[in-house]
Each structure stands twice: as structure tokens, then as C-alpha cells.
Image (cartoon, rainbow, N blue to C red):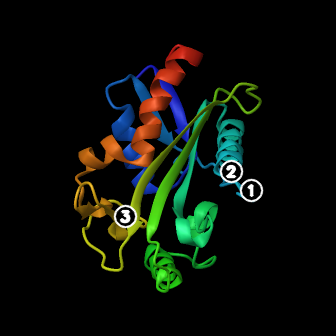
């Protein structure tokens, strides 16, 4: 491994996905948690602003290049919610079960069950990098009231994919990485890093 980048997240699921996506490219992904980086606030109303704040925070505290993702699920009928609040949708003492229960309840009286995941990835060479590398992707599906599958995390058991006839949680890790919002964004990030940083 000749290159190192800090992932500005303590989420084990995200860490697994990023490590797998960077595997074989000579890039070591380090978790900010293992480096003792304090999490930063995410007060902004857009995925882009939150991702940039997290990347700059990790770069500042480690002195290494950093990558941050801000992602979430948006239900069409809920006017952009949960959106940037996806991880804390049910409140500060959040967990996946509570967040999913709130989303299902909020959509119970809505005919439109369409939803999409959004992922914005930001990479910076340093805290003050004036040219952050930014990519974005979307993964469309619909919310089902019947969970299925044990893979993935977050809202995946309720995120139904009509073209596959299953939920995101029923996809294998390889299948999910190939088609998910994060997988699509990573596929766009790698050539962007190659162009901007020579990585």
C-alpha cells in the first residue's frame, strides 16, 4: 500500500464497502475512528456541505488526505425527507429499527412509495484543499412495508428494487457495490481522483 486516505466515518458498514471498493488499487483506507478523529457536526441542509465538512475535519485532525460520504434516503412523498437526516430520522438516540419504523409510519397513508438513495463523495488532499473532488450518484427504488434480506444496513431491508424483484438487503455485497448509490459514486470517484491527484 503506497497511498493512504482517511474515511471520515465510524460506520463499519461503510468502512467495509470502501475497503472493498479500493482493494487492489494500492490505496489503504483508514477509519477515522481508529485514528482517534473526533466526529464533526453535520449541521447543513445538503449532502454536499456535510460531506465537505466531514472530509476537512478528518484531514485537519490526521494530516492525511480524506474522503467523506454523506448519503441518505429520500422519499418522494415526503418532500425530501429523511434526506440528510436519514441516520437520525427517529431522533438523537437513533438506530436502524427506529428509523425504519418512522419511515414506514410516515409513508403509511401515502400512495407514492418511490424513494431514492443519494450519495455525495468528497475527497480532499488537506483541510484547506481549494479543489475538493466531488461526485454524486442516485439509486432509485421504492419503500416496502415488508422487510426482506439480511445484507446491507440502514434502510436496505425496506428498499425494494423492482428491476431485481428484491430489496437492497437481499443483494450480495458484490451486487450491491456494483449498483448502489455508493458503488456508483465510487466508480465515478476513482477516475476523478486519477485525473485530479494522479491516483
The residue identified by callout 2 is: 50
Say above or below: 91 vs 32.
below
Residue 103: % across, % down: 50, 77
Q: In the rendered view, would you say 17 is above or below 195?
A: below
- Residue where numbered disc 1 is placed: 44
Few, some or many residues within 10 Å of mark 1 (<14, 14–19, 20+): few
Q: Quadrant of residue 21?
A: top left
* Mark 3 Cα-neighbour bin, 10 Å: few <14, some 14–19, many ≥20: many
Q: Mark 2 vs mark 1: which is more N-terminal?
A: 1
Q: Position of residue 167 (x, y in %)?
A: 29, 64
Q: Give the image location of residue 164, x and y in percent.
A: 23, 55
Q: How far is the residue under mark 3 from the one under mark 1?
A: 24 Å
Q: In the structure shown, which secondary structural element does the residue marked by tag 3 occupy?
A: helix
Distance between the Cα atoms at labels 3 and 2?
22 Å
Q: Which residue is mark 3?
A: 156
The disc label shown at residue 112, or none: none
The answer to which of 128 and 69 lies nearer the viewer is 69
**Residue nearest the observer in this picture, 45 or 114:** 114
Is 10 above or below relative to 192? Answer: below
Residue 23 vs 61, above or below: the answer is above
Give the residue at x 59% y 72%. 78
Contact, mark 2 vs mark 1 (Cβ under 8 Å): yes
Residue 15 in percent (x, y) is at 43, 48
> Mark 3 near mark 1, Cβ–Cβ under 8 Å?
no
What kind of element bears circle 2? helix
Left or right side of 133 for 40: right
Amino acid at each position: 500500500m503506497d497511498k493512504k486516505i482517511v474515511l471520515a466515518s465510524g460506520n463499519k458498514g461503510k468502512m467495509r464497502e470502501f475497503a472493498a471498493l479500493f482493494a487492489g488499487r494500492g490505496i489503504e483506507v483508514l477509519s477515522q475512528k481508529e485514528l482517534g478523529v473526533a466526529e464533526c457536526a453535520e449541521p447543513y441542509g445538503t449532502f454536499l456541505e456535510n460531506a465537505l465538512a466531514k472530509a476537512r475535519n478528518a484531514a485537519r485532525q490526521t494530516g492525511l488526505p480524506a474522503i467523506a460520504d454523506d448519503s441518505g434516503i429520500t422519499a418522494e412523498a415526503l418532500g425530501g425527507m429523511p434526506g440528510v437526516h436519514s441516520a437520525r430520522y427517529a431522533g438523537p438516540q437513533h438506530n436502524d429499527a427506529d428509523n425504519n419504523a418512522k419511515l414506514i409510519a410516515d409513508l403509511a397513508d401515502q400512495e407514492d412509495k418511490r424513494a431514492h438513495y443519494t450519495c455525495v463523495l468528497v475527497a480532499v488532499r488537506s483541510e484547506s484543499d481549494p479543489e475538493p473532488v466531488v461526485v454524486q450518484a442516485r439509486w432509485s427504488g421504492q419503500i416496502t412495508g415488508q422487510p426482506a434480506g439480511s445484507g446491507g444496513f440502514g434502510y436496505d431491508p425496506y428498499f425494494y428494487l423492482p428491476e431485481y424483484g428484491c430489496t437492497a438487503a437481499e443483494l450480495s455485497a458484490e451486487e450491491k457495490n456494483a449498483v448502489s448509490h455508493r458503488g456508483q459514486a465510487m466508480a465515478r470517484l476513482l477516475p476523478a481522483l486519477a485525473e485530479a491527484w494522479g491516483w
